[in-house]
Amino acid sequence: MAYLDSISKLFPVDSWLVERLRQAEHASREALTAVEEVCAFNHLKVLRAFQDAGVTEFHFQDSTGYGYSDLGRDVLERIYARIFGGAAGLVRSQIVSGTHALTLTLRAILRPGDTLLAACGRPYDTLATVIGLGPRVPGTLREWGIEYREVKLDPAGRPDLAGLGAAVAEIKPRLCLIQRSRGYALRPALGVDELARIIGAVKAASRETICLVDNCYGELVEEREPGEVGADLVVGSLIKNPGGGLAPGGGYIVGREELVEEVAAALTAPGLGSELGAFENKRLYYQGLYLAPIVVREALRGAIVAASFFRDLGFKVDPLPDAPRRDIVQCLIMGKEEVLLAFCQGLQKGCPVEATTRPEPANLPGYADPVIMAGGTFIQGSSIELSADGPLRPPYAVFLQGGLSYPYTRVALLMAAQEMVNRGLIQEKWR
């Protein structure tokens, strides 16, 4: 029995939706092939890094207490540095999220009186709160005397390179933050070539300004990484792309050796730095990184077909199905609150974990609006596993990301569409 034909026998999905998904896949053949080629390159890149580092079973052993002389941790950090284009790396399970990794880095590098310049407009909600732009909470950067400036995006949602260069020349910021993915903004993700142009504009105006790239959701999507085009620091989360769906938590910082060591000192203590930090379950971090290019490929396949499928059902999508992929996030514009809720609640029904849970909007720490989040993940909050979320504000966009396997993502997309059909929000006659 053909795979797609079996879906309607195993799951309560209308046959016409299955056929529309089949058509969406067929229309996306070229984009899907391009993803395969990038995955193959990146998988070999990771394999070579493992071999050159001399990884053995010994490196998977746990460390305890202070974590002194943890060779497995040190080798893993060298592999990360090589893959993501830095001289040194800090890879730690004690980092709880991408926002934590960025906050740790900003606090380590910036001093009272320094200026942080955002190159891509206002950062996403949780990082905006860290800076001091959101709800009043203790410990923000502004509270510690750090100035904040930003350069607005141009009308097309792209970085304003001329405006950025002028701002850097005038302000001479200590650090320029470059956010690769969109957050909850309706703007395109940044590719590595565009990151290179941004970094070039900053360095042309001020060689001393540190360029920090928030690489969340963008790892291993292209053949090059931000560190390979001049980023001084690259930061991300291990429950996103590089963890491969296996790393149970953590974050990474890669870049110039002296800067990475400053971040390590902020994580542990001055004088201790990267020498300390017990590390358990290292095999999952190694194996997750090794499999990450394949998992990213599966996520990208799901994103491409989701774009084609839901565009065919009448929704605006960004990026378009055949557009080059710069991260794993697919934005679908639902247009109405009830459609956004139906999508997320239907997607949840297709998950392997918490399939009977009904997600509801809630006020979450760091977010200005109620947010609905769907995703039955094995690792809490993992967004390399299939998940979808969006703020309850116009235009009611849902941000879909992840997917450990493409066949499962297909089912979840169909369940989301079926929920919308069941509630009378889309109909077969609308095709």
Image (spheres, rainbow, N blue to C red):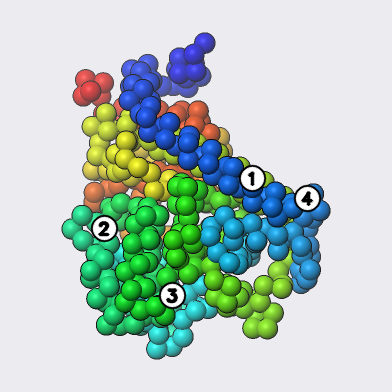
Q: Which residue is mark 4?
A: 56
- The disc label shown at residue 47, or none: 1
Residue 258 against residue 420 in the figure, above or below = below
Q: Disc 3 versus disc 4: distance between alpha carbons?
A: 36 Å
Identify the mark nearer the N-term, 3 or 4. 4
Identify the mark nearer the N-term, 2 or 3. 2
Q: Residues within 10 Å of mark 4 (few under 14, many from 20)?
A: few
Q: Disc 2 versus disc 3: distance between alpha carbons?
A: 21 Å
Q: Secondary structure at mark 3?
A: strand
Q: Disc 1 versus disc 4: distance between alpha carbons?
A: 13 Å
Residue 76 spot, x, y in % from top left = 67, 58
Q: Which residue is mark 2?
A: 158
Q: Residue at x 35, y 42 (%)?
A: 324
Q: In which quarter of the view is residue 340 placed?
A: top left
Residue 247 relative to residue 152: left or right: right
Identify the mark nearer the N-term, 2 or 1. 1
Residue 27 spot, x, y in % from top left = 32, 25
Q: Which residue is mark 3?
A: 210
Q: Residue at x 42, y 70 (%)?
A: 211
The amino acid type, in three-letter code, at marker 1 is Leu
